[in-house]
Image: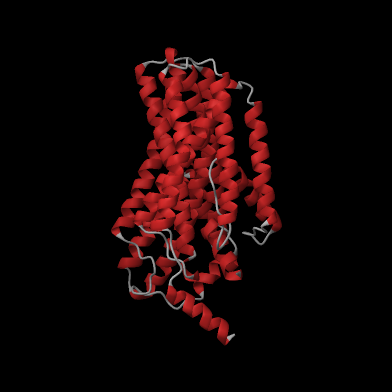
Amino acid sequence: EDDGRVLLGNAIGSRDEKAIKLTELKDEITDNSQEYPFTALQCIGTLVSLILFVVDVVTDILLAMEYRDHDRVLEFALTSSVIIASFLVTGILSTIWYIQDVAGPKSRVKKILFLIAAFPFSIIIRNLVFIKHGWLSRKSRSEEKSKHYKQMMKEGRDVSLLMMFDSFVESAPQLIIQMYIAMHHPSQESLHLEILRSFTIATSLAGLSWSVTSYYRNLRISSATSGLKANSICGAVGYFLWRVFEIGPRITAIVMLLSVDSHGLYIIFGSLVHWFIMLTMAFLRHVKVYDEPIQNIMFIVFISFVQIISYMNLSHGKSRRFAIIYYTLFYVENVLMVLLFVLWTDIDKSSWIFIVTVCVASSGTLFCTLFMVMYYKLCHPKVSHKSTDVDVELKVKS
């Protein structure tokens, strides 16, 4: 259990030395002993993830400029503020992690100066560094393979966590803002603006879902030593579709409730209640990712906020009971939001906006459940018999 918690903490992004040393207990890593070697497919996946991130940011910036050109000051301010917030959060986190990892005062000064210059591009840099170490872990001399493989694994953990932070600071608020504007100002829009905003909504949803999928895959890879094999390509695709039909309808339902409550009181109250329930359950389950109490509390507070929109499993082992409680609350909230929208909205109920939003928010439950069941039945990693036998043998010997 202690090793499981350390692995979980390492995968989530703990800078804990115990977590890092756990992988160093293994024998020297050779070409044949790399459990998850860097492959061409992995390189393509990283490049696709990077391209998706860049397209998402660029479309958001272009949309903000379009609002500015149309003298829509409020829309411009809201759209641009979340972009700036995401750059600040990811840049600060990435800089802190680099400072913690770099040894030596001279090297540290050089790194800090470089990071200040490249502050807005921290996610891009870390993805490229991941590809670099992955390539070198395959092509370097034997004595260098181990070093580059370990660095590749660490960079993969860090960049997946960094992209998840970016998604929930930038993509999730951006989805809510742009969908709300699209719902309430259709007659004031030019065709160019509508197309650009629709593309922004699609890339934000894809980026948000993919960041959760990437984070989950890295969590599984880091937990591989405990007998769990990380999910395959089929599993990653299934998990991604599950998250798309979980997050998309959830955001749509939030926007629907926000459209009938212009002051946002229902959303604020409901979000606080949901966040407090998740926070309480995390403490009752004794979730411990960081050794430092303050860091651990800050992480739990953030993850409880994330769970307003999407399910996050923090336990090492079976979590069926918690998942049932979470999704029961999740879908009851979705149904209530849709019902309040249908009863109170002043939008024409025969308009395409009303029909599409109700269908998306309602069908999400069906498709999310379908892909979730398919994922757990067909693609979810299982503990191998071999690893189970080894565990039993170790227990007998001890």
Name, please, the residue furthest toward the bottom.
Answer: 397
Vertical relation: 322 (above or below) 146? above
| Front residue of this view, candidates 128 and 179 | 179
Residue depicted at x 34% and y 64%: 136
Asked if residue 83 can be seen in this view, the reply is no
**Residue 232, position in %: x, y?**
37, 59
**Residue 390, position in %: x, y?**
48, 79
| Residue 367 position by quadrant | top left
Quadrant of the image containing the C terminus: bottom right
Asked if residue 11 can be seen in this view, the reply is yes
Residue depicted at x 43% and y 69%: 147
Quadrant of the image containing the N terminus: bottom right
Rendering colour mode: secondary structure
Name, please, the residue furthest toward the top.
Answer: 187
**Residue 309, position in %: x, y?**
55, 40
| Front residue of this view, candidates 20 and 132 | 20
**Residue 316, position in %: x, y?**
56, 62
